């Protein structure tokens, strides 16, 4: 995953309402890994205000006793998210969008994996996600809160099909309003609608092979 210094969104895009400024502590990165900070856009379910903040990349459900899970939660399968204990509460009312400039996928055998950089038709490629606020068990009500998030995935389509059998669910403009409205009660039908609307976006991706990912910097997205 990468998000560079160009986090601007064209004014005509729905997401511009949420991305009015960079999240606190913003630093560009070209090699974000699970459990590292990931920028997410969401709507405050109490005030209704748009928010753009960093989240711990791996959703930790409210009932977890620690800031981790026994199984990976940096991705959530769109086909089953509404049924899974870790994700179903977030599907209902805590949905987010992860705006990135691109992401990576690998091909080839395990002994010789080749990373590919993948970009969308616009500078920002929004992905559908879920979030959860995790609270430290021994902390007071006003402290110890951690924003955590996951990225929805679906069966690959378009440019992604030759690379991997799964891809992120890309966020379409027409579905973004409902997805980020906490008053819209989420269910599997909403997830499926967002997932299907991402397929046309996958046709307009561009990708190319890059060198092995080491460190962090704009050189990571230079063609191999």
Image (spheres, helix red, strand yellow):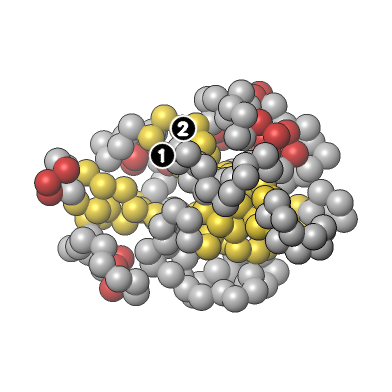
Mark 2: give few (<14), some (14-19) or many (20+) Cα within 10 Å. Answer: many
Q: Which of 177 and 77 is in front in this view?
A: 77
Q: Where is residue 116 in the image (x, y as percent from the top left)?
A: 27, 53
Residue 8 in the figure: left or right of residue 2: right
Q: In this view, does 214 lie above or below 155?
A: below
Q: Which residue is drawn at 44% across and 53% down?
A: 34
Image quarter hosting the C terminus: bottom left
Q: Residue 47 is drawn in which quadrant?
A: bottom right
Question: Quick check: marks 2 and 1 in contact, CB under 8 Å?
Answer: yes
Image quarter hosting the N terminus: bottom left
Instruction: Determine whether the residue tagged by mark 1 lies in a helix, strand or loop.
Output: strand
Q: Where is residue 157 in the image (x, y as percent from the top left)?
A: 39, 33
Q: Which of 115 and 158 is in front in this view?
A: 115
Q: Name the residue under label 1.
A: 167
Q: Name the residue under label 2.
A: 154
Q: Which residue is drawn at 60% across and 76% down?
A: 25
Residue 206 in the figure: left or right of residue 162: right
Residue 2 in the figure: left or right of residue 95: left
Disc nearer the start of the sequence (2/1): 2
Q: Is residue 53 above or below residue 116?
A: below
Mark identifier at residue 94:
none
Q: Which residue is drawn at 70% across and 51% down?
A: 137
Q: Residue at x 70, y 34 (%)?
A: 89
């Amino acid at each position: 995953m990468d998000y560079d210094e160009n986090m601007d969104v064209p004014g005509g895009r729905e997401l511009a309402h949420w991305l009015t400024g960079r999240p606190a502590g913003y630093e560009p990165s070209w090699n974000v890994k699970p459990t590292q900070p990931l920028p997410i856009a969401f709507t405050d379910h109490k005030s209704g205000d748009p928010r753009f903040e960093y989240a711990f990349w791996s959703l930790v459900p409210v009932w977890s006793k620690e800031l981790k899970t026994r199984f990976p939660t940096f991705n959530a399968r769109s086909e089953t998210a509404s049924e899974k204990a870790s994700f179903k509460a977030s599907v209902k009312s805590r949905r987010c969008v992860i705006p990135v400039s691109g992401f990576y996928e690998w091909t080839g055998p395990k002994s010789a994996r080749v990373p590919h950089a993948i970009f969308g038709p616009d500078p920002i490629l929004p992905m559908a996600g879920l979030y959860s606020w995790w609270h430290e068990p021994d902390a007071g009500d006003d402290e110890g809160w951690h924003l955590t998030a996951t990225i929805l995935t679906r069966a690959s389509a378009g440019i992604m099909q030759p690379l991997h059998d799964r891809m992120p669910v890309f966020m379409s403009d027409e579905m973004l309003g409902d997805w980020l409205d906490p008053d819209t009660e989420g269910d599997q039908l909403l997830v499926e609608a967002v997932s299907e609307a991402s397929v046309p976006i996958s046709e307009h991706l561009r990708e190319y092979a890059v060198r092995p990912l080491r460190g962090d910097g704009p050189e990571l997205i230079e063609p191999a």
